[in-house]
RNA sequence: CGGGAUAUAGCGCAGUCCGGUAGCGCGCUUGCUUUGGGAGCAAGAUGUCGGGGGUUCGAAUCCCUCUAUCCCGACCA
């Protein structure tokens, strides 16, 4: 491609409304432009990268799955059948056609694929099957942000597998796990598969694939031995010791008029924060028979809302009681709550269960109990894993301790089970000649998000630094003073032809601009390899090479340039 | 949806408090010079000052209202 023929829309200045670096650089490099909130046009340069990501995804998926293409618009009937027409909130973009029939723009395609498979697949002999597509999805996010990272319209690769046994599902799940590793390896990203919560999509086992980057929105937990990785939503928090130490203090009621928060309590009474607990009141499920339930975590820990929501006694979505409700039920304000004499059911975190001589609100305004010990002063309530893990916690697999890094979720694989196939009566005839409900798996990759996450992970002051596999161009040729040197013109044209013939994806910088301008643009656009053709070097039979991450030029013999580049790109 | 902010040329911003002919830098156009790290000189083009309403002799500026965008929170396969 000749640069003079390419729409290069680079910006010197950063648009004011771009927050994260990938968004800024995608705008500056001329990859995308915003149309409306959460909607982006892909310019030629950005589309080249997007297509390369898609190609790698397809090549790996095609090894074990078949590609289909489903409609973006979907009839309401299917969503009513699965129950999600009501379940899904305003995030589902709904509309009516000219006949006043309800439709939505698909945020995901479980319903459509399940409908298709139940019509086409009749016998267990046709299973397992794994179907995927690369499609534009729409989710009417409350707050789209970070450019293409959390946009409303985005491109996703979604795959769905169908089985008659859990073993078969597990087999495909394992294959997809490996496929995802192969995809992200080829994309050249620093990523980790981690254990994940299933969220509202339902089902059992699941892994997320995260690109590691400080700007990530998720906390990823690792152990020091490299044997455990999980999203913090899922990471199991183990108690620091097997059982509580023996009491050394007496239980006492203390006036704490100015201590509404744990920090104030710890500072004013010189307590060890690990010897304090905080008590949170949330709505209970109807089945539990209570209106509210108390959740107790240690003063230095934070509640894991996903774990809380997954408890049988806790209403989903997790809803905190208002101050008025707390006063009505307990008779004290939020700053003075505790497990002693609590009139509602109580669940304590594992770390709280092994605390001794600890302090807690007295359920009397401006009073706390200090020196509390389970068993002696109050009965030990239900114990559960309620908190977020923190750095230094013991790993749940018993190996080493935990550390936390930020990650961007770019892939998610689920064992769905029969949630959709049951609701939509997707059955096949089994070996016994009776209908069997199919078991499903689903596997997603956020294609557009992958592009942004690659930039979050690979950039410097000058711009993007693409992994070769997804760079819009692999190598750029920059002729110096081409307008006045025939030698340079001829040599660079020949080099351009040779590199193209050798299969390189090459950008020929033939624009009528000054060299510094071109260098800056190429660096902003993140082209991984650059060859400068100058009269000086040519006279010595040499070309100048500079990798995007290199500090200095390297002189190479002109007749070895193909081998040199092949070596650099490990071809 | 709650809290905070912004809206002036393609981009980044000043001007608004204190009403009086719409500005700066970058980019863009033309010419000349220049060409190894975002060139110099000269001449130009570009604005319903987010929309609507009001106050006023006069509104980018004051008042009301709507809209859009961004940030924090809630939400999020």
Image (cartoon, coloured by chain):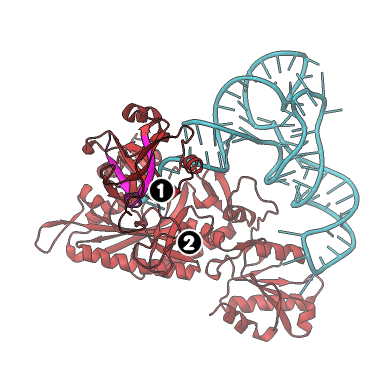
Chain colours: A red, B cyan
**What residue did someone put label 1 on?**
A275
Residue beneath the point at 25% across and 50% down: A420
Residue A521 locus on image (x, y percent):
68, 62
Q: Is residue A351 magenta?
A: yes
Q: Which residues are magenta?
A: A344-362
Determine contact: label 2, label 1, CB under 8 Å.
no
**What residue did someone put label 2 on?**
A211
Dot 2 or dot 1: first in sequence order is 2
Report the side of A161 relative to A138 (left or right). Answer: left
Badge 2 element: strand
Crowding around mark 1 (Cα neighbors within 10 Å: few <14, some 14 to 19, many 20+) is: many
Name the chain letter of the residue that bears numbered label 1. Answer: A
Please name whichever residue, A412 or A338, is drawn nearer the observer in this view of the structure: A338
Check if mark 2 and mark 1 are on a common chain: yes
Residue A39 locus on image (x, y percent):
52, 46
Report the side of A46 relative to A399 (left or right). Answer: right
Residue A560 locus on image (x, y percent):
65, 85
In the rendered image of this protein, does residue A462 appear above or below residue B5? below
In this rendering, the label closer to the viewer, 2 or 1: 1
Spatial CA distance of label 2 from label 1 is 37 Å
Report the side of A471 relative to A79 (left or right). Answer: right
Residue A534 locus on image (x, y percent):
76, 76
Please name whichever residue, A482 or A426, is drawn nearer the observer in this view of the structure: A426
Picture mark count = 2
In the rendered image of this protein, does residue B19 appear above or below residue B40? above
Quarter of image, res A58 = bottom left
Badge 1 element: helix
Q: Could you tell me if residue A62 is visible in this image?
A: no
Q: The N terminus of chain A lies in which quarter of the figure?
A: bottom right
């Amino acid at each position: 491609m000749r640069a003079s023929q390419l729409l290069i829309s680079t910006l010197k200045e950063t648009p004011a409304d771009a927050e994260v670096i990938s968004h800024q650089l995608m705008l500056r490099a001329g990859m995308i432009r915003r149309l409306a909130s959460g909607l982006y046009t892909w310019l030629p340069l950005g589309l080249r990268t997007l297509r390369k990501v898609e190609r790698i995804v397809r090549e790996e998926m095609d090894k074990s799955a078949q590609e289909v293409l489903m409609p973006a618009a979907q009839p309401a009937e299917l969503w009513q059948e699965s129950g999600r027409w009501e379940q899904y909130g305003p995030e589902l973009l709904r509309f009516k056609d000219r006949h006043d029939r309800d439709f939505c723009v698909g945020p995901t395609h479980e319903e459509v694929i399940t409908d298709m498979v139940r019509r086409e697949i009749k016998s267990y002999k046709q299973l397992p099957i794994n179907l995927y597509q690369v499609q534009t999805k729409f989710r009417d996010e409350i707050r789209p942000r970070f450019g293409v990272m959390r946009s409303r319209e985005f491109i996703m690769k979604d795959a769905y597998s169908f089985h008659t046994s859990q073993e078969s599902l597990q087999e495909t799940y394992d294959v997809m796990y490996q496929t995802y590793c192969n995809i992200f390896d080829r994309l050249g990203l620093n990523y980790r598969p981690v254990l994940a919560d299933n969220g509202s999509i339902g089902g059992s086992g699941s892994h997320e694939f995260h690109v590691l980057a400080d700007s990530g929105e998720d906390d990823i937990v690792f152990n020091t031995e490299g044997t455990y990785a999980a999203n913090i939503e899922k990471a199991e928090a183990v108690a620091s010791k097997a059982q509580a130490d023996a009491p050394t203090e007496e239980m006492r009621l203390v006036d704490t008029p100015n201590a509404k928060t744990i920090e104030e309590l710890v500072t004013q009474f010189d307590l060890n924060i690990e010897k304090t607990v905080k008590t949170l009141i949330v709505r209970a499920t109807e089945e539990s028979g209570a209106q509210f339930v108390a959740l107790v975590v240690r003063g230095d820990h934070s509640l894991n809302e996903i774990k809380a929501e997954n408890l049988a006694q806790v209403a989903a979505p997790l809803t905190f009681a208002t101050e008025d409700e707390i006063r009505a039920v307990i008779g004290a304000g939020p700053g003075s709550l505790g497990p002693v004499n609590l009139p509602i059911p109580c669940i304590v975190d594992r770390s709280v269960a092994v605390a001794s001589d600890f302090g807690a609100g007295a359920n009397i305004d401006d009073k706390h109990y200090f020196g509390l010990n389970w068993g002696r002063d109050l009965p030990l309530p239900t114990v559960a894993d309620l908190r977020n893990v923190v750095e230094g916690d013991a790993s749940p697999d018993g190996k080493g301790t935990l550390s936390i890094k930020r990650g961007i979720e770019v892939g998610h694989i689920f064992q769905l089970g029969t949630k959709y196939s049951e609701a939509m009566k997707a059955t096949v005839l089994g070996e016994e000649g009776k209908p069997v409900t199919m078991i499903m798996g689903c596997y997603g990759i956020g294609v557009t998000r992958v592009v942004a996450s690659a930039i979050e992970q690979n950039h410097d002051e000058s711009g993007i630094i693409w992994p070769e596999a997804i760079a819009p161009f692999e190598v750029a040729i920059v002729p110096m003073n081409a307008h006045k040197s025939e030698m340079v013109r001829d040599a660079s044209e020949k080099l351009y032809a040779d590199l193209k013939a050798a299969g390189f994806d090459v950008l020929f910088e033939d624009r009528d601009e000054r060299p510094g301008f071109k260098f800056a643009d190429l660096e902003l656009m993140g082209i991984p390899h650059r060859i400068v053709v100058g009269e000086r070097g040519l006279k010595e039979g040499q070309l100048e090479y500079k990798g995007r991450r290199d500090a200095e030029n390297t002189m190479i013999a002109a007749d070895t340039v193909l081998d040199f580049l092949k070596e650099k790109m490990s071809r």
